Amino acid sequence: MSNDITFSDLALSAPLLKAIDELGYERPTPIQASSIPPLLEGRDLLGQAQTGTGKTAAFALPLLQCLDLDERAVQAIVLTPTRELALQVAEATRSYGKFVGKRGVTVLPVYGGQPIHIQRKALARGVNVVIGTPGRVRDHLERGTLSLASVRFFGLDEADEMLKMGFIEDVEWILGKAPDERQIALFSATMPGPIRRVASRHLKDPVDLKIARQAMNVPTIEQFVMPVGRHEKLEALQRVLEAEDYEAVLVFAGTQRATAELVEKLQALGHAAECIHGGMNQPQREAVVQRLRARRTTIVVATDVAARGLDVDHIGLVVNYDPPRDVEIYVHRIGRTGRAGRKGRAISMSLSRDRHMIKAIERFTTQSMQRMRIPGAAEIVDRRRERFQDKLRALLEKDLGEFRAMVLSMHAEEGIEPMDLAAAALRHSWGRSPLYVAPDPDPEPAATNDLDDMVEIVFPVGNWNRVRPGAILGAITGEARLPGSAIGRINVLDKVSFVAVRSEHVARILKAMKGVKIAGRAVYPRLAHPTRR
C-alpha cells in the first residue's frame, strides 16, 4: 500500500477516526494499512509482524467497528500469551473505542492471578470484548461464566509466544468451541509449523500477510532507559527534570487525562509545565507551541498528537513517561529533539512489563538504549548550583554600580567584610534549601565489580523520613551481618531509597531487614527490578 494512505482512507467509522486523531496517530503502519481493509470485509487473516509494529490497532479497530452495542454479550475475544499483554491490549482497545456508542465499549481483561470472582461479576454485568490469557479464558468457559454464543471475532496475538509457553492446546480448544460464523485474525512474529497447522485448521481462506520492518537509525539522539517501579515514576520524572540540562523538554504521556494530571502534579512541585493533547482545540495547541518557541515555557507534557507538526529546534530532551504504542511512534517522539544540528537526549521510563517494547525499539533503531539510574540528591544539588552560578555570571555583565556602592558603604560604616556580604546575598537569593547535601557513601573496593553483579533493593524510607545513607548502611550490615563491601551505592530519594547490593546477598538482606526500623519506621524492602534476577 502507498505511504500516503491515511486512516480516513480505510473506511473506518467516525468515532474510531476521532479516537485515532485524539491519540495522535498520523498514518497507519504497514500492518495496519494491510490488515484493516480485509478484516472490515470479514476476511480471516494470518499476519506475520514483529512486536512494536502496531498490531493491536490492526485488529482492534476492525473488531470495534463490527460490534453491536445494543447486544449485551461478549462479541469479540482476543487471546494473548501474558497478563501484561492482555492489560495493554485491553487498555488500547478501550482508548480506540471510547467514542463508540453512548458510553464507549466495555472491555474486560481476564487473566490468572486476579480473583476469578471479580471477573465473573464483570462478565455477568455485560461485556462487549474480552482480552485474556488462554488458560483463564478456558477456565471461564468450563465454569459457564463466559459464553461464545455471540462471539463473532477471535484475535490471537503473538501466537508463537503462546506456543512457546505451552498454551497452544488451550487455544485450539477455545477455537474448537467457536461458532461456525466467526472471523479469526492470527498474528505472530514467526510462523513455525504448529502455528501454520492451527491456521489451516481454523482459518477460512485467510489473507496471508508478512510485514517486513525496516530498521531506522537515530544517530544524533542519545537514548536511555530508566527502570522504575509503578509508584516511583513521578518522583523519577521530577528528579530527571531537576538533574538534566535542557532548554526545553517534551514529556510524553499515554492519554489526555494522564497529561492533564501530570501537569497538575508538576505545577504543584514548582515546575512551569503545560500540556498539549487532542482534546484541545487548534488555537489552544498553537498557543502552547508558541509559548514553547518563545521560551516562555520549558516543559510540555503531551500525547502523541504533539509529534504532528511540532517543530521546535531547542527541545533538548524527550522523556517517555508512558511507553509508545509502537516503535514508529517512538521514533516520531524522540525525533522532536536533536533538531537543527543539535544533539538530543531521550529517556524512556520502563516498568518491568515494558521490556518487550524496549527490545523492539532497540531492534528498530539499531541502537542499544543505555541503562540510566534515577538521579540522586547530590546530582540534583550539583545541577542547581551550576544553574545558580550561570545566573550570577550573567548578572556580572550588568550594571551593578548601586549594589557595589552599598557593599562599600556597609563595609566602611559597619565593618562588614565584602566576602561576608556576598555570601549573605547568595544565601538570600538561593532560598531556604541547603546548598550542599551529604554525598552518598562510596562503595568499598570489593563492591566496585561490574554492575551486572549488583542488584538494587528499594527501601520505603527517604529524605522525607530524614534518613541518611549511613543509617541504611548501618542497619543492613548490622541486621544481615554483612561487611560494608557487600553494599554499593545508596541513592536516597524523597520517599524511597535504592541500595545496590552484591547479588549473592539479596535473599539474606531481604529476610534480615523485614520489619526492621530505620529512622523510626518499620521497613519491608523489596527488589527494585525483580525481572533482572
Image (spheres, grey):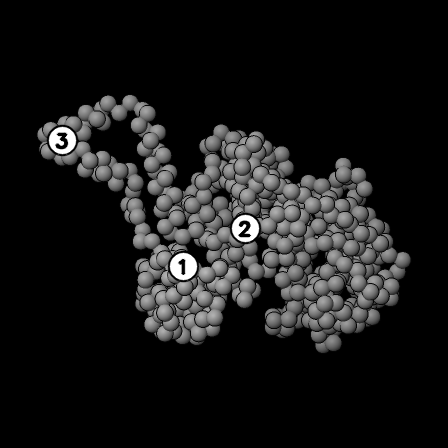
Where is residue 316 shown, x and y percent of the image? 51, 38
Q: Which residue is mark 3?
A: 411
Mark 2 or 3: in front is 2
Mark 3 vs 1, N-terminal side: 3
Q: Residue furthest right?
A: 205
Depth check: 68 or 251 in front? 251
Type of amino acid at the residue the image marks with label 2: Gln
Residue 279 seen from this side: no
Depth check: 446 or 37 in front? 446
Mark 1 vs 2, N-terminal side: 2
Where is residue 32 shown, x and y percent of the image? 75, 48
Distance, label 3 to label 1, CA atoms, is 46 Å
Q: Which residue is mark 2?
A: 370
| Quarter holding residue 429 | top left
Task: Give the side of residue 356 with respect to residue 425, left or right.
Answer: right
Q: Which residue is mark 1?
A: 489
Type of amino acid at the residue the image marks with label 1: Arg
Where is residue 533 shown, x and y percent of the image? 54, 66
Q: Is residue 251 above or below residue 206?
A: above
Residue drawn at the location 45% of the way across and 66% of the way down: 502
Residue drawn at the location 59% of the way across and 60% of the way down: 353
Where is residue 120 shown, x and y percent of the image? 66, 71
How packed is label 3: few (under 14 Cα within 10 Å), some, or many (20 or more)?
some
Res. 37 mark: none
Q: Is residue 410 above or below residue 222?
A: above
Mark 3 or 1: in front is 1
* Label 2 with label 3: CB-CB less than 8 Å: no
Q: Residue furthest front?
A: 445
Is disc 3 placed on a helix, strand or loop? Answer: helix
